[in-house]
Image (cartoon, rainbow, N blue to C red):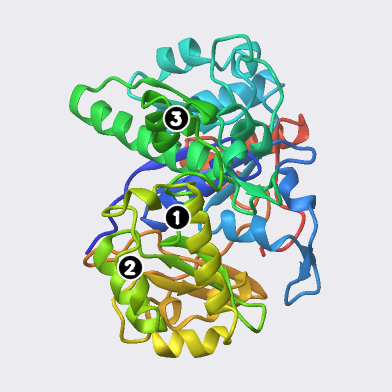
């Protein structure tokens, strides 16, 4: 079958993680993504450590390579009138443009919504920022840590009583990548039906706040959500992380009574089968009895290794999983069976985001910046002499290194 997004053309002006990850997924499903970088440093994720060396010996950032697979690359100077005109002409032939500058940057360049919409009425403009296009923080700088802090998420992720920085960029990926992906496709569906594009304002903090639903429900009930004291943050024995004799850990997600009973039977704690929050008021999250039960289960599980308990629970329907390292997760039989992990040129690629009938997956190459500059302009109707003039005038550049 034809890939589901075949024929869709996306102009990608984003940098770092949120936007490039969104357009990576679009490219994986068949969209033509044109990554447009400036003539200077461009996407500075490329210069972030750690690095590996590719087959040619070139030093590369593997995350940059993975996020930008399957995209065509152009280097364009948007500060020059000629470069801006190139972008506007490309916009006329595109379905969407996605960018992650601070709000107002495109307007200052003369490439804001009004200018783009006038030249390309059906174009969708998707802007990703930390705080959105209005409000007191509209122009404030920020990163993932700031967004999860402001949305109340970081307060709920704790270690030893202190807020702990998760190594999954929740603001960037959940608030940025996935929200932009959904909102952009919604707007594109509307544009297909009406012929009119829309400006999409994705604020990463907004999206986090919109989906932080359980703490908001606690507040509605007059409960101040405290990590380690609520149902889903470690306040009950049935939803908990436990250490084992070998210092490895088990994630027990036996939230429902049937799973808790299965867990208790599997590890030899049958006497605790009815000690569950759903039928025992004393086991309400965060109560002294709940904490005592957690310690009782923890002491029992510390008596044997994780492998021992996993073997005991192998046939139990109990919602238990080992806490794996990132390296172990890549090698787990489930990931292997799903054919998720692809290693190409020393870089780990994970994909696709979801399976679909008739859709295969293969890792597409990552172009060096500017690889497709000339070809894309030729497709847009520029002559060879026009392109040479743009390069000579500093509005356009071609690749100087090999593709990764």
Tell me, for residue 120, which label it has, or none: none
Identified at 68% across, 63% down, the residue is 62
Answer whether labels 2 and 1 touch (C-beta < 8 Å): no
Q: Which residue is mark 3?
A: 223
Vertical arrangement, residue 283 with respect to residue 351, above or below = above
Tell me, for residue 236, which label it has, or none: 1
Q: Earlier in the sequence, mark 3 or mark 1?
A: 3
| Left or right, residue 345 beside residue 214 | right
Element class at badge 1: loop
Vertical arrangement, residue 94 with respect to residue 133, above or below = below
How far separated are the C-alphas under marks 3 and 2?
Answer: 25 Å
Q: Position of residue 312 (x, y in %)?
A: 41, 89
Q: Is residue 312 visible?
A: yes
**Other-residue count near label 1 (Cα within 10 Å), few / some / many at <14 / 14–19 / ≥20:** many
**Other-residue count near label 3 (Cα within 10 Å), few / some / many at <14 / 14–19 / ≥20:** few
Foreground of the two, 175 or 111: 175
Q: Earlier in the sequence, mark 3 or mark 2?
A: 3
Element class at badge 2: helix
Tell me, for residue 260, which label it has, or none: 2
> Dividing the image into 4 quarters, which one contains the C terminus?
bottom right
């Amino acid at each position: 079958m034809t890939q589901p997004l075949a024929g869709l053309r996306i102009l990608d002006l984003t940098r770092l993680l949120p936007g490039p990850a969104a357009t990576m997924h679009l490219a994986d499903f068949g969209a033509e993504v044109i990554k447009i970088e400036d003539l200077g440093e461009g996407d500075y994720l490329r210069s972030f450590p750690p690095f590996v060396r590719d087959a040619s010996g070139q030093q590369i950032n593997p995350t940059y390579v993975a996020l930008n697979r399957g995209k065509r690359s152009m280097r364009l100077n948007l500060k020059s009138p000629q470069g801006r005109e190139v972008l506007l002409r490309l916009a006329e032939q595109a379905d969407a443009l996605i960018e992650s500058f601070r709000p107002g940057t495109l307007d200052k360049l003369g490439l804001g919504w009004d200018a783009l919409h006038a030249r390309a009425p059906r174009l969708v403009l998707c802007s990703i920022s930390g705080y959105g296009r209005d409000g007191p923080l509209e122009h404030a700088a920020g990163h993932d840590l700031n967004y999860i802090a402001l949305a109340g998420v970081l307060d709920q992720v704790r270690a030893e009583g202190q807020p702990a920085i998760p190594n999954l960029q929740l603001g960037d990926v959940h608030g940025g990548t996935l929200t932009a992906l959904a909102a952009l496709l919604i707007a594109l569906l509307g544009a297909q039906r009406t012929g009119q594009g829309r400006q999409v304002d994705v604020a990463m903090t907004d999206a986090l706040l919109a989906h932080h639903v359980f703490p908001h429900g606690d507040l509605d009930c007059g409960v101040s959500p405290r990590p380690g004291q609520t149902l889903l943050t470690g306040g009950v024995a049935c939803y908990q992380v436990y250490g084992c004799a070998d210092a490895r850990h088990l994630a027990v997600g036996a939230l429902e009574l049937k799973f808790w009973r299965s867990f208790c039977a599997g590890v030899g704690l049958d006497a605790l089968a009815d000690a569950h929050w759903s039928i025992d008021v004393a086991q309400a999250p965060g109560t002294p009895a709940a904490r005592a039960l957690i310690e009782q289960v923890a002491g029992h599980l510390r008596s044997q290794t994780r492998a021992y308990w996993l073997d005991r629970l192998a046939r139990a329907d109990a919602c238990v999983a080992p806490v794996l390292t990132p390296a172990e997760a890549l090698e787990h039989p489930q990931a292997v069976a799903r054919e998720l992990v692809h290693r190409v040129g020393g870089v780990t690629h994970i994909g696709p985001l979801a399976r679909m009938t008739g859709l295969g997956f293969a890792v597409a190459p990552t172009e060096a910046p500017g690889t497709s500059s000339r070809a894309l302009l030729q497709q847009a109707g520029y002559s060879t002499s026009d392109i040479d003039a743009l390069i000579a005038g500093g509005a356009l550049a071609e690749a100087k290194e090999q593709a990764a």
